[in-house]
Image (cartoon, helix red, strand yellow):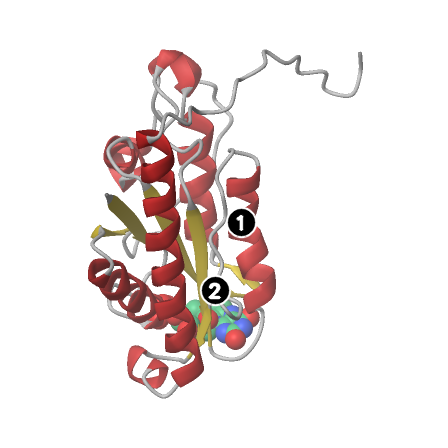
Amino acid sequence: MKVLLVNGSPHEHGCTRRALDEVARTLGEGGVETEVVWIGARPVGGCTACGACAKLGRCAFGEKDGVNAFLEKAADVDGFVFGAPVHYGRAGASLLGFMDRAFYANGSAGRPDVFAHKPAAAVTSARRAGTTSALTDIEKYFTISQMPIVSSRYWNMVHGREAADVEQDEEGLWTMRQLGRNMAWLLRCIEAGRAAGVGLPEQEDGTWTNFVR
Ligand SMILES: Cc1cc2nc3c(=O)[nH]c(=O)nc-3n(C[C@H](O)[C@H](O)[C@H](O)COP(=O)(O)O)c2cc1C
């Protein structure tokens, strides 16, 4: 079992990464392999709605900023943690741009859906405020993609301006550890269900109505 943790901060080793490392360590203790992917320090653009992914099965711009490499890795993992710092009261725009394009390109042009039915969690970091809103920003991708959301005993947030500050956020780190344990538990439940013959839910072919028909 493997979980991919995405560091959506421009700081490779900042507060978000400190939180993700705590989740990863606890997942490791629970027998789950982990890998951290960093989206980098350059601005990451949002979706241009060019529609190329529907033909290519990947984002037309995704070679440059890691979106396509992430989709390749995502195919081989069992769960995800996406982390972002709070910027202006919501999740940092770079992670949201990255996720817009990864989730829009996912499953296009006959490529398999790499997200559906895989557990996911959101993690945020702030100096002071905006964390619950940022969590919701990230969780929206999960709820439209058939991804069970993993929770903890408090909202998945840490506080700090730099990584060293997070060491003082005992409750934040405790929350991250519990999140890791809960994720490891859910992954084991899914694995046990699969071994017992529990199949994935039937998928009905729906109609996109766009509110006009
Ligand atoms: C552009 C920008 C906007 C920010 N806006 C907020 C904010 O609205 N609320 C807050 O508490 N911190 C805000 N911060 C501070 C970061 O959220 C905080 O330092 C965070 O823990 C940094 O995480 P990182 O080290 O992973 O980047 C902002 C930082 C930047 C660069």
User: Image point 48% across, 53% down: which residue?
Assistant: 93
Instruction: Report x, y in % for residue 206.
Output: 63, 14
Residue at far bottom of view: 168
- Residue 99 drawn above or below residue 112: below
Q: Earlier in the sequence, mark 2 or mark 1?
A: 1
| Badge 1 residue CB within 8 Å of ligand 1 | no
Q: What kind of residue is marked 1?
A: Glu
Nearer the observer, 79 or 50: 79
Which image quarter holds the C terminus? top right
> Cβ–Cβ below 8 Å for labels 2 and 1?
no
Kind of element beneath mark 2: loop
Q: Quadrant of residue 194?
A: top left
- Mark 2, other Cα within 10 Å: few <14 / some 14–19 / many ≥20: some
User: Image point 21% across, 59% down: which residue?
Assistant: 28
Instruction: Report x, y in % for residue 185.
Output: 36, 53
Residue that carries the numbered disc 2 in the rendered image: 152
Residue that carries the numbered disc 1 in the rendered image: 139
Q: Quadrant of residue 90?
A: bottom right
Which image quarter holds the N terminus? top left
Instruction: Report x, y in % for residue 26.
Output: 27, 65
- Residue 51 drawn above or below residue 3: above
Q: CA distance from mark 2 to mark 1?
A: 14 Å
- Mark 1, other Cα within 10 Å: few <14 / some 14–19 / many ≥20: many
Residue at far front of view: 196
User: Image point 51% across, 34% down: which residue?
Assistant: 146
User: Image point 44% across, 31% down: which residue?
Assistant: 116
Nearer mark to the viewer, of 2 and 1: 2
Q: What kind of residue is marked 2?
A: Ser
Instruction: Report x, y in % for residue 169.
Output: 40, 84
In screen coordinates, is 104 left or right of 67? right
